[in-house]
Structure formats: structure tokens, C-alpha cells
Amino acid sequence: MPTNLPPEAKDKWAEVEATNDPKLKLQKYQEFLSEVPQHKGTMKLRGQVKKKMATIRKDLDDKKRKGTGKGGGGPKLFIEKEGAAQIALLGMTNVGKSSLLAALTNAKVEVSPNPYTSREPVPSIMSYMDIRFQVVEAPAMMEGSADGKAWGMATLGSARNADGLILMVDLSRSPISQLDLILGELEKARVLVSKPKGRVDIDRKHAGVSLRIILVGKLIGCSMREVEALLRSYRINDAIVKISGEITLDEIEDAIFESTIYKPALILANKTDLKGSEANLRRLEAHVNGKLPIVAVSCEKRRGLERLGEELFKTMEIIRIYTKEPGNKLPSSNPFTLKRGATLQDLAKSIHGEFVKEFAFARVWAKRLVFSPQKVGLSFILEDGDIVEIHTK
């Protein structure tokens, strides 16, 4: 946890944030590190900064190779999102990730017994009911992935970019050890699979807007005045900072450098057809103790795979909303997908920004309503399967 940084270090961090030029940012990172005292309290911070520097160096090297015609660059860190949600498929080598994609999706993947076959993220589409999930197979995880070992940046970059995660383990060989390694590397990369008590989001896109702190929750051991003083000490004077849940001042300072993010996840336990898998599955279930859903499958025999879509749908907390044009008898067969708890205003925004401005009223058809259609406003909370007809002014 970064604490008690000298003013010189904070000034250098402000310079880091002020530039988008990769070469200059790399220089400013180095200058910042030179001002950070080396002790136990700054170890994590120094590690985070060094990973950022390694990513910039790699990007610069890739661009240089492309410019000189000496290669096509390294693996892609991000895949553009498609479908209802993007799911990163994570696991150690030879757990069956490529076999899963071959069995479930449209992906052209190489299924091989050789270790570390996939070395860059591979996107694919998996259909479930009338929606589609984009499943991205990330390169194999290993101890040290979060520190940038091998293609760890691409793997953890896929995890941070995705909407949710599939943590895949091989039931024939120490699934608990595999899971613990995956969770450990994710935690080092500040990716959590259980909802944290609190969260800090710092949006610096509002240049010229005075510092605004939105508190929805509780500050632990500090006051709003101390929070504002901390942010301003890092020259954060024109941002919107959202604090939710229970948060300490140290956690707010930590978020200045890199925010912790939560990703809903499930465990896919593969190779139920192999010897010893049944006993290992029971041990895994006891170890997880209901904290994450587990789907047991055999990609080789194609058993249990039908449960994956259903569990992803539940885990991602997705709802499907069907829209109907005024005057039409039937709704569209392609639903909009929103998060559970979404309102009619969320739907209107996702259709078109002008729909909120020009909104007059909506009609909703739903089994839970006493009568359908029911005339509702923008604050109406939607549920899976609702049919909505929006009327504008």
C-alpha cells in the first residue's frame, strides 16, 4: 500500500498523468520511481509502476519492429467487445481451453497436446438462447503472469478488459492448486472475483471541471476533508471521484495508481471423464465452499457443456429486453441485454441518446404485472423477458 510519499514523488506522478506520449511517459515513470522511497510499504506500488513501464516498452518495441519490417509485433492486449458480454477464458496450459472453444463456438483454434499453444487472445462467439457471449481464450496462465512473465500482460489484460471470467481447471491434476494460482495472479493484477467492500473510480476525463467527490457509502478512519486533501496533493484537481461501499484513505491512495476491479466469475472443471476426477471435483467443491459456481464438464466427450450458457447468464446478471415499435403486433426477436436492476432509462440510453430527451412514456408487457401493457416512466425497473414499447414526444 503506498503511504507517506514525499511531495516530490507526488509532483512527478502528476507529470506522469499529464502526458500521453509513450516515450515521455516512460521517462516520467522513471523519474517518479527515483523519488519513491524503497521500503515495504511501497513494494506493491513500485511493482505496479514497473509493469506499466514494461508494457510501454513492449508496445514501443513492437511498433519499431513493424516499422522496420522485422515482425508483426506482439500479442494483442485487447479484443473489441461483441455480444451480450465478453468473457475471458483463463487457465493453465493444457486444461482444455482450446477444446472448449472448438466444442462450443465458431472459433478456429489449434487443439494440441503441446503446452502453451495459444500465445495471444483468441475471440469466439458462443450462442445461448437468443443472445451471444463473446468468449476470449487468453494465453495460458503461470506463476509470474501478473509480473509480466511470458505473455502474462496479454492474459491479465484480457481479464481486466472482459465483463466476466471463466476460470478453467483440469480435474485430473490438482485442480485446487490450479485455481489458487489463477486467483493469486488475478489478485496481483488487482482483479477480484468476489465483490469488494468498497470501490474508488477516478475519472480524469473532465479537464477544466473542478474536483467533485461523490460518496455513496462510508469512509473508514478518515473524513471527506482528508480525502480531498489527499487527491489534491496528487494534483487531482479536475476529476470526478466516485467512492462507494466502505473505503479507507489508504485504499483511495492505492486507486490513484491503479484501481482494483471486480469481475464476476465461474469455475469450469474439465476432464470429468478421466480417472480420479470425481474425487478431485468433490475436493474442489469443498475448497470453494459455494463462493463461486462450478460447472463440471468433459470437453473431450462433450458432456455437461449445456450448463455453461445457463450459468454464465446467471453469473453475469444479464436480462433480455424485447422492444416493439408502436403499431407493430410483435416485438423484435433480437433483445437488448442489460444488467439486472436496469431501468427503462438505461434501455432508452442503449437504444439512442435522444430517446431519453424525447421520452414521453412507455408501455411494458410482463407476466409479473397485474395487467399488460402497463404505462410506465423512465424509473421503471425492468426484468428478464419484458417487452417494451417506447413513445416519444
Image: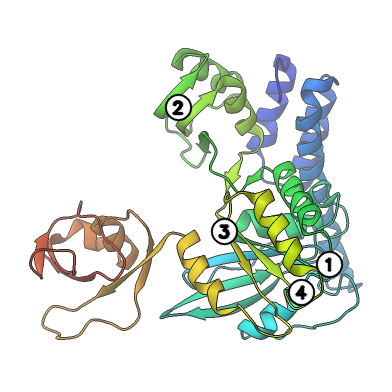
- The residue under the point 52% across, 66% down is 312
Give the alpha-carbon distance from disc 1 to disc 2, as whole Å: 46 Å
Q: Secondary structure at mark 4?
A: loop
> Which residue was labeled with disc 3?
293
State left or right for residue 25 relative to residue 310: right
State left or right for residue 143 relative to residue 194: right
Query: Is residue 381 or residue 203 the one in the foreground?
Result: 381
Give the alpha-carbon distance from disc 4 to disc 2, as whole Å: 48 Å
Query: Is residue 25 or residue 307 the one in the foreground?
Result: 307
> Which residue was labeled with disc 4?
96
Q: Earlier in the sequence, mark 4 or mark 2?
A: 4
> Which residue was labeled with disc 1?
93
Quadrant assignment for the C terminus? bottom left
Give the alpha-carbon distance from disc 4 to disc 3, as whole Å: 19 Å
Amino acid type, label 3: Pro
Would you call the spot at circle 2 few (<14 residues within 10 Å), some (14-19), or many (20 or more)?
A: some
